[in-house]
Amino acid sequence: MTSPLMQIEDLSISFKIDDEWCRAVNGISFDIMPNETLCIVGESGCGKSITAMSLMKLLPDSAKLGGSVMFGERNMLSLSERELEDVRGSRIAMIFQEPMTSLNPVLTVGEQIAEPLVLHKGMSWSAARREARNLLDLVRIPDAQKRLGQYPHELSGGMRQRVMIAIGLACRPEILIADEPTTALDVTIQAQVLALLEDIRKEQGLSIVMITHDLGVVANVADRVAVMYAGEMVETGPVEAIFDAPSHPYTQALLRTVPRADAAFELSPISGQVPPIQAMPDGCRFSPRCAEEHRACRVTPKLSPGPHSVACWAREGAA
Amino acid sequence: MNDLLVVEGLGKTFGSKKFMQAEYAVTALRDVSFTIGEGETVGVVGESGCGKSTLARCVLDLITPTTGSVLFDDTDLTALDAKSKREMRSRIQMIFQDPYSSLNGKRTIGKTLAEPLWVHEGVRFKDALPRIHAVLKEVGMPISAADKYPHEFSGGQRQRIAIARALILEPDLVIADEAVSALDVSVQAQVLLLMRGIQKERGLSYLFITHDLGVVRNFCDRVLVMYLGSVVESGPVAELLTNPKHPYTKSLRDAAPIPDVSKRQSLALLEGEIPSPANPPSGCAFHPRCPRATDICRKEAPKLEGTTDQRMFACHNPEP
Amino acid sequence: MTTVDTTPPASETRSTAASLLRLARKNKLSTFGLVMFVLILLAAVFAPLIAPHDPLAQNIVDRLQDRSAEYPLGTDKFGRDTFSRILYGLRVSLLIGLTSTALAMVLGCALGIIAGYRGGWIDTVIMRCMDMLLAFPTLITGLFIVAVLGANFINIVLAITVTILPKFARVARAPTIALKEREFVEAARALGYSDTRIMSIHIAPNIMGEVVVLASLWAAYAIRIEAYLSFIGLGVAPPTPTLGTMIRDGFNNILDAPYVSIYPGFAVLLVVLSLNLVGDGLRDAIDPKLRD
């Protein structure tokens, strides 16, 4: 069995809100395997984005971090800012949701792709520009030479996201974190970008951690899935297991709320709403909205062992 | 079924002829015709720049259309004077996409809900309270919400309040512009069910603007598919999605990811990008991206035609 | 879709009152300015109770005196008590300054909101007129109006109003254009509300925060203009004391009795300083970029 590229152990992230520490992420553990697409899926406020940020320790100083993020021999959470800069953008890269705002409007596309190469790989600007051209080819941007000299506002949303991907890939990272990379795009463009990411993962042999709220996207691109709810990981497993045999009541309920383009069925919403971070319920955080009950729901359940694991008392031994 | 709304040949060209400035014209809407029956839900689906939001705003006369007519309950809205138009507006209401910006943050929910009653019916706040409480209950909100401000509510709750505001004047037609797009799926399902329940109770009609085919499939009776300002295909939802005639409809359907691993496929790829409405391609606007395009597509724009009113498409080489 | 922060955009939650509270807690200097301004205001309002002498009573024997127990800030060339005259002068100066600022705020905002909301030629006409007013140095505009219409209370208020009105119009117009695109304004139109209603009830309260900040700063400016106008003899007619006329009156004896001009000058300084401190604090409290 291959060993994981990154091991996240008991990660917790707290923020101070009105003089009280609130746990936005509450002790989650998962692995990132080499050359896989791991999707972290959940609704807003579930902590998926800050989890992704914490993998590079890209959180404000006001956040209190617990647990460990082991990348090789090193714990990302205990690295100095200096050491982190060496890792960020070169061994782990990130792309964001808003291709409109994550590119600098006053620099050309070429300059922005070349910058990490000069910074991390010590390339000369002319060499970096040549490499930038190759990267534009890699992300299938036609007319690469012309595009290099253009500014972000001259590109469409889909093209900008491709440029973001090119910047992310510039230093040939081992892990690419994609935070809702296609949410702002039209469906036909989303399909192109998702296909591109999949091809690149295969060609370059990197791992993609994709943060998304869209279960349709997950079903189409993920190898493994981690479902988060209210700062906790409720279920992880291979994509087939999650969609064909969802185990956690939240995963099951979530799948019944997604309207599908291929069939009409009675949507059954989850009652209530995600609790605010300042007032998380004790024990299982889903219990107030859960249709099932177990006498132990007041105690926080742990993820069961095994490739398809679930954190639910009512599933103990069943998973 | 009687037609509540009949839209005919609606077109909108945004333009500018300013002193010392370059002249420009963008056709956002081109010859759009459709009907909505009483108690019917008609979806409008398409990607950005397809004109679906402009369409909604033209029907409501937030934007004045350049050509065409909007018949609501046999009255031509485009021919009315400003005052009658405002009166008509109490019968057509709109729900917007962003529940964070569609409510005025400086006013309590009660005041926001009372305002339409004051403006249209001259009802004072005190006398409006029973109706405010009733409509809050109808959308599943506690009546205590009336004293609170929008920022005290979550996105889903705000959208319920926005629906309450649309309902309080008892409209016959509600236009929903991406009304559930900004919501999480579990909340989205709540709001969709609420809207359907209200429709059953009140018998109103919806014009439902969205980019999400999944929502269309589960919420609408009929659907218009738009591309670059024109309707390319229309018909009953189930039929249109199972057997699309226009290649764009088919691509759109195949690009929509389905949450089912057994249906996993390389999402059928549509080449290229959506052209700019300021500079549309010749002939059929879709031809540069169309896998079925032939010579005629480059030269001549196809007309929206069909065997019945129910099923129409604009394509020279339709899918089999 | 991201982050833990589920609270809505701050601009919606912050009211003007909340801004004041925030200001008081975070900005000691501005709180000091506010306290100072309130004290000045109280002193002006209760001038008849505080003033030891009649501000108009002449006492030639005691002319041009320095500070003493009898005359806390000395006397002018007619032997009138400077302290009493400053208290009464404050009343006039503050009344003129605050009235004209309030007028300029209301009219300027109305023009700015109409220009921003309507756009098109209305916008062009209103804003070009404002630009024309701005093109003249403010003092010249004021001077011109007073010189043509004559120097009395109403004309001076009018002159100051006109000189600072364009600033309010500009400040109100920009956020109106932004708010016009917000969905709640579109929603109001969709509900069939009239344009007047949308502008006054939905847009105006949303820009008040920024406008109030500006008002406090321009009130200080208005008081200065009043002093200028009085100083060059275009102020309220004597013998009514205003701070500007008092400074000018002292100029004839500036060498042998400088204090006659200096104390009223100092009073102007205190008013302007306190208003500026309040304004700066309000701006910090309201501008999200400068918070924390």
Image (cartoon, rainbow, N blue to C red):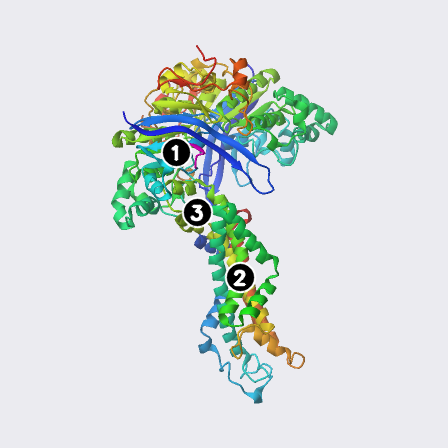
Task: Give the residue number, with chain letter if any, for mark 3.
Answer: C13
- Tell me if mark 1 has few (under 14), some (14-19) or many (20+) residues whose alpha carbon lies within 10 angstroms of its own: many
Residue A227 highlighted magenta (yes or no)? no
Residue A169, position as x, y percentages in the image: 62, 24
Residue B68 highlighted magenta (yes or no)? yes
Task: Give the residue number, with chain letter if any, for mark 2.
Answer: C162
- Tell me if mark 2 has few (under 14), some (14-19) or many (20+) residues whose alpha carbon lies within 10 angstroms of its own: many
Is the residue at mark 1 from the same chain as the one at mark 2?
A: no
Q: Which amino acid type is marked by label 2?
A: Val
Q: Is residue B39 left or right of residue C34?
A: left
Q: Which amino acid type is marked by label 1?
A: Val
In which quadrant is the C terminus of chain A drawn?
A: top left
Residue A238, position as x, y percentages in the image: 46, 17
> Do residues under tags 1 and 3 come within 8 Å of each other at their CB atoms?
no
Q: Is residue B131 left or right of residue C237?
A: left
Kindly report the distance in space between the C-alpha atoms of the residues bearing marks 1 and 2: 43 Å
The disc at residue A311 is: none
Task: Give the residue number, with chain letter if any, for mark 1.
Answer: B59
Q: Is residue C101 left or right of residue B5?
A: right
Closest to the observer: B302 or C118?
Answer: B302
Q: Secondary structure at mark 3?
A: helix
> Do residues under tags 1 and 2 come within 8 Å of each other at their CB atoms?
no
Residue B236, position as x, y percentages in the image: 35, 19
Q: Is residue B283 above or below residue A22?
A: above
Camera-side mark, 1 or 3:
1
Q: Which residues are magenta?
A: B64-69
Q: Which amino acid type is marked by label 3?
A: Thr
Closest to the observer: B37 or A138?
Answer: B37
Kindly report the distance in space between the C-alpha atoms of the residues bearing marks 1 and 3: 34 Å
At 42% across and 15% down in the image, what residue appears?
B244
Kindly report the distance in space between the C-alpha atoms of the residues bearing marks 2 and 3: 34 Å
Q: Secondary structure at mark 1?
A: helix
